[in-house]
Image (cartoon, rainbow, N blue to C red):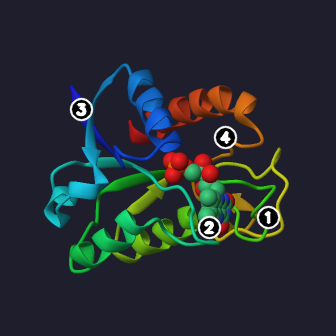
Amino acid sequence: MKKIAIVYSFNSTKSAKVASKIAAIFKNYKVEELNVESCKGEEFLLYDSYILSVPTWFDGELPNYWDELLPALGKLTLKGKKIAIFGLGDQKNYPENFCDAVGILADFFEELGATIIGFTSPEGYTFESSKALKNNILKGLLLDQENQSKLSDERILNWARQLEIELS
Ligand SMILES: Cc1cc2nc3c(=O)[nH]c(=O)nc-3n(C[C@H](O)[C@H](O)[C@H](O)COP(=O)(O)O)c2cc1C
C-alpha cells in the first residue's frame, strides 16, 4: 500500500483535529502522521507524498514550529515529491492575510523542486488578499473554523478525493 505522510503540529488545537480527519479519509493509502515540532529535515526525503498542515499566525506569518523547521530543509532537493497543503485561518478578522501561510509554504517547497498539488477554487470565501491565491487559484485547501466550520467537512472530503486522483 502506498504511503503518505501528513505533517502537522500535534500540539495545535484546531489543525490537529482536521489533520486526523483527513488522515482517516484515505482508503487506498497508508497515512503516517508526523509531528512538525519534532520533524528532522531528512524526513522530507522518506516519502513520495506529503500533506502539510499550516495555520496562519501573527498577521500573515507561519507558526513558530514551521518557521523553525524550514532552515533544516533549505538544502534538500525535493524533485519528484508531491506536496499538498491545507491551512486554517480566519477570513473575518484577518481579511488581508487570510491563510497566507499556505502560500508561503507552497512557494518554499516549490523552490526546493516539489510539485504542489491540491489547488482549490477561491469561491465561497470572502477576503481581501491572501498569499495562498495565485492566478485566481488557491494553492491548497483553506479552512476557516472560526466563521465557516459548517463547510469544512465537505471541503475536506472533496479535497481528499481530489488528492487521491492527483496522487495516483
Ligand atoms: C494572534 C492571532 C493571529 C492570527 N493571524 C491570522 C492571520 O494572519 N491570517 C489568518 O487567516 N488567520 C489568522 N489567525 C487565525 C488562526 O489561523 C485560526 O484561529 C486557526 O484556526 C488556528 O489554528 P490552530 O489552533 O490549529 O493553530 C490568527 C489567530 C490569532 C489568535
> Spatial distance from mark 1 to mark 2, Cα to Cα?
10 Å
Q: Which residue is mark 1?
A: 95
Residue 34: image tag: none
- Kind of residue sitting beneath label 1: Pro
In this rendering, is residue 32 above or below 1?
A: below
| Residue at x 76% of width, y 53% of height | 122
Please tell me whether mark 1 sits on a helix, a strand or a loop: loop
Quadrant location of the N terminus in the rendered image: top left
| Residues under numbered marks 1 and 4 in contact, where contact means CB atoms less than 8 Å apart | no
Q: Quadrant of residue 114?
A: bottom left
**In-front residue for pair 58/117:** 58
| Residue at x 81% of width, y 55% of height | 92
**Mark 1 Cα-neighbour bin, 10 Å: few <14, some 14–19, many ≥20:** some
Q: Position of residue 103 (x, y in %)?
A: 57, 67
Ligand 1 within 8 Å, label 2 CB:
yes
> Spatial distance from mark 2 to mark 3, Cα to Cα?
30 Å
> Spatial distance from mark 1 to mark 3, Cα to Cα?
38 Å
Residue 100: image tag: 2
Ligand 1 within 8 Å, label 4 CB:
yes
Depth check, mark 1 against mark 3: the one in front is 1
Residue 145: image tag: 4
